[in-house]
């Protein structure tokens, strides 16, 4: 349920045979459906990267006899499939994988880093273990969410509903919100691995008492009300979220990220049908993030 924010997962295999990387490239519009199917084949996690604005790649690791056959993958993905790409994994992959995960530093306010990187001289320090399937927040969509989150005014007269992080991934946004004093935080994702990763990372960061996490299906369930909703999702899912709020706004403010620049205007319009007013927009590397304000939040001092 996230945007394409997961990056270079460590190969999870105990085989002594040569390890291969199998990339399944699919159309972005169908990415979430393909991901759900692939997770049945790779319950220990996979890698997700952006190939281009229209294509997402999901990669599985293993020996040749451990990976699914091309024919099975073609049947699974159907018309969504763009290409299948197989490549050998270098012997030094584990070390190169660590080198891929670099700290995200936002001025002197926030550092998001893997546990093997030293702390920086920032006001907030968030330690995220990328584990088997999730990155450390360096993707543009997560960075834009963090920048908007840091730009909000300090909590003052919030209702006490706290924050919902929808599509939590490794828990970067949920943990940052908790450390900023915006708890309690409810982190939701349709991937059980994301729930596990978020809870583990919350414990490492000392905010386990402020962050709860659970599985959630946006297409079938109603998002709980919150003072602030963080939605780092793909554009089509943000439209589903917006349509669900059209008749009954339930959040003081929404940070919506994971949408391409070309999708931002339509997403903003759809939220506007429910009275949510766009207050700020950030763009980076072809991605956009929106800060949206609910009708009743015009005098809410928590909104920057």
Image: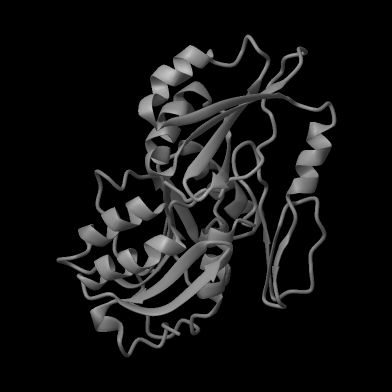
Residue 124, percent from left and from top: 67, 71
Residue 126, percent from left and from top: 66, 62
Report the residue at 80% width, 55% height from top.
117
Residue 58, percent from left and from top: 54, 34
Residue 291, percent from left and from top: 41, 74
Q: Quadrant of the C terminus?
A: bottom left
Please state which of residues 30 and 144 is positioned toward the viewer in this rendering.
30
Determine which quarter of the picture holds residue 29: top left
Q: Up-down: is 214 above or below 58?
A: below
Q: Is residue 223 visible?
A: no
Report the residue at 53% width, 25% height from top.
42
Determine which quarter of the picture holds residue 137: bottom right
Q: Is residue 29 left or right of residue 64?
A: left
Determine which quarter of the picture holds residue 48: top right
Q: Up-down: is 28 above or below 103?
A: above
Q: Is residue 179 left or right of residue 276?
A: right
């Amino acid at each position: 349920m996230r945007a394409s924010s997961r990056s270079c997962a460590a190969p999870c295999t105990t085989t002594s045979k040569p390890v291969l990387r199998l990339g399944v490239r699919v159309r972005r519009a169908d990415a979430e459906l393909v991901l759900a199917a692939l997770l049945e084949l790779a319950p220990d996690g996979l890698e997700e990267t952006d190939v281009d604005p229209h294509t997402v790649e999901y990669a599985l690791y293993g020996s040749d006899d451990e990976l699914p056959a091309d024919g099975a993958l073609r049947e699974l993905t159907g018309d969504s499939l763009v290409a299948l790409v197989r490549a050998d994994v270098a012997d030094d992959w584990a070390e190169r994988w660590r080198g891929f995960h670099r700290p995200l530093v936002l001025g002197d306010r926030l550092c998001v880093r893997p546990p093997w990187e030293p702390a920086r001289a920032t006001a907030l320090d968030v330690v995220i273990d990328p584990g088997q399937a999730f990155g450390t927040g360096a993707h543009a969509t997560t960075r834009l969410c963090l920048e908007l989150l840091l730009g909000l005014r300090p909590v003052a007269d919030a209702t006490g509903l706290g924050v919902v992080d929808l599509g939590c991934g490794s828990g970067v946004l949920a943990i940052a919100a908790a450390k900023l004093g915006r708890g309690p935080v409810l982190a939701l994702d349709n991937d059980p691995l994301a729930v596990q990763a978020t809870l583990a990372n919350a414990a490492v960061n000392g905010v386990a008492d402020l962050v709860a996490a659970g599985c959630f299906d946006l297409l079938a369930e109603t998002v709980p009300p919150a003072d602030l909703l963080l939605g780092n999702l793909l554009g089509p899912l943000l439209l589903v979220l917006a349509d669900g709020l059209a008749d009954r706004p339930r959040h003081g403010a929404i940070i919506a990220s994971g949408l391409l620049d070309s999708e931002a205007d339509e997403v903003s319009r759809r939220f506007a049908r429910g009275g949510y007013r766009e207050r700020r927009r950030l763009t980076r590397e072809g991605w956009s993030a929106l800060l949206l304000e609910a009708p009743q939040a015009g005098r809410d001092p928590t909104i920057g």
